[in-house]
Amino acid sequence: MEWLHKLNEAVDYIEKNLDNDIDYDEISKISGYSLYHFQRLFILVSGIPISEYIRRRKLSMAALDLKEKKLKVIDAAMKYGYSSPTSFNRAFKEMHGVAPSEAKKKEVMLNAYAPLSFHIVVEGGDTLRYRIIELPEVRVIGYRLRSTLEDGQCYSDAPKFWQEIIQSGKLETLIETMNHEIDGVIGISNYQIMEEKSDFDFYIAVTSDKQPLEGMEEYIIPKSTWAIFECIGKNPEAMVHMEHRVVSEWLPSSGYEFANAPDIELHPPGDNQSEAYYSEVWIPVKKVK
């Protein structure tokens, strides 16, 4: 499959340039995707942002150089793109649990993050139930979280944000404003990726004709074509599993590719911890040219 081959080529480029400046535009060119879409695809397939993958690989190679090649700490910091020994020391200790100066000791255990290689594994045979729809702009109101894709920060921030909104009673207040144009609470993941800066806005929202209440914001979901996938099971596990299946099973042979619009998760009324709970994953798509 061409997209998988291109994804692996992009990873190969990264691997060959760990001790150089990695050109994100070149990654985009190799993959055949815009940088925005490549980052989204990489996250869905690997589970981590591309910036975090590069960081882990650089620190893995730095550990090897320190331990096996006896490279000086300051030289390792410069080789792998750190502006100072202090920032290198902090990042190294966060990943390996020891300072770089300790890495040369034989008894010290270090962590290794191996290069990624992507493959399609066909298993199960479960049916993916989906539909393709076109929708005009949709107005929603809700609560916004500003986070970042860097170091996977958004993946820990978003669940905490859900809990905060639920426990504070804000979710009940939000639901009271819903007009049921789309029936349920909507999670909106809006990625704003420019070069190495990866902002992430996450909304917990509902369709509404009312003005935003205190602490809420208005957001317009752009006009788009959506591939909507049915999820059955407890969340967030059911949705995470579905997102991986969409990328690995459906997208490669669908005749569609990602469109430039947010990812959406729809949570209809019900017990989202039930094995029978119904929810939906919405992926913005466009026909492959």
Image (spheres, grey):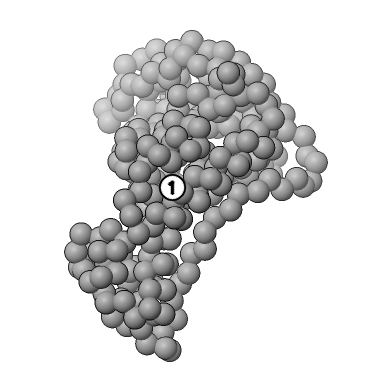
Instruction: Please identify the quarter of the rendering in which residue 232 is found.
Output: top right
**Residue density around tag 1, few if under 14, some if 14–19, many if 20 or more, within 10 Å:** many
**Left of 151 or right of it: where is 83?**
left
Residue 139 placed where, x, y %? Answer: 41, 16
Residue located farthest toward the right when viewing the structure as drawn? 125
Residue 109 placed where, x, y %? Answer: 44, 81
In the rendered structure, which amino acid carries the disc numbered 1? Pro
Give the structural element (helix, strand or loop) at label 1: loop
Instruction: Please identify the quarter of the rendering in which residue 269 is found.
Output: top right
Identify the residue at image location x=59%, y=36%: 3
Give the residue at mark 1: 49
Instruction: Please identify the quarter of the rendering in which residue 85 is found.
Output: bottom left
Identify the residue at image location x=61%, y=24%: 256
Above or below, 99 relative to 218: below
Question: What is the number of callouts on the image?
Answer: 1
Q: Quadrant of the C terminus?
A: top right
Identify the residue at image location x=58%, y=53%: 117
Whether residue 122 is visible: yes
Residue 128 placed where, x, y %? Answer: 72, 33
Whether residue 189 is visible: no
Foreground residue among 252 and 239: 252
Foreground residue among 241 and 55: 55
Residue 230 placed where, x, y %? Answer: 66, 31
Above or below, 93 relative to 143: below
**Left of 122 or right of it: where is 189?**
left
Foreground residue among 136 and 275: 136
**Left of 207 or right of it: where is 131?**
right
Identify the residue at image location x=35%, y=33%: 192
